[in-house]
Image (spheres, helix red, strand yellow):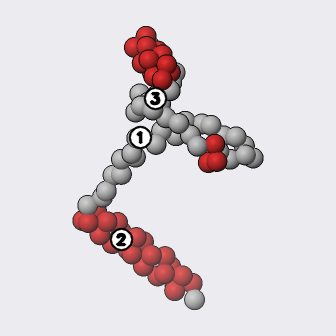
Amino acid sequence: MPTSRTNPLNDADLAAFIAAQKTFADTAQSWSVDVSTVNTGTFDLSVKNPNVLEAVAHRSPQDIMDEIAALDAESAEVLASIRALL
């Protein structure tokens, strides 16, 4: 679990870090980075945990179709307004 202002480092996190640090083992919360992948222009080492997959929220086909219909209706209104100006 990453730490932040709302989720500060606690004693259990520190103990897990110390245990992993003894062997430099990769865990779900700590990992190694190949130096060849580091951007040498910025040397950005910001946290990007490769062990955590991003959850993707898929919309239902009905929601997608409803949005397309709403956008089509909006486009038709805009086109009608333009046509009225001609």
Specify which label sits upstream in the sequence, 1 or 2. 1
Specify which label sits upstream in the sequence, 3 or 2. 3
Specify which label sits upstream in the sequence, 3 or 1. 3
Determine which residue is flagged by label 2.
68
| 69 lies above or below 26 | below
Q: 36 and 60: which one is in front? A: 36
Place of residue 47 in the rendered image (x, y in percent of width and height, measured from the top left): 55, 36
- Image quadrant assignment for residue 7: top left
Determine which residue is flagged by label 1.
51
Quadrant in which the N terminus appears: top left
Tell whether 69 sits left or right of 32. left
Q: Nearer the viewer, mark 3 or mark 2?
A: 3
Which numbered disc covers residue 25?
3
- Image quadrant assignment for residue 46: top right
User: Please, what is the three-letter code of the amino acid marked with disc 2?
Assistant: Ile
Secondary structure of the residue carrying tag 3 is loop
Which residue in the rendered view is the most extreme toward the top?
Answer: 11
Residue at 49% across / 76% down in the picture? Answer: 78
Place of residue 17 in the rendered image (x, y in percent of width and height, measured from the top left): 47, 20
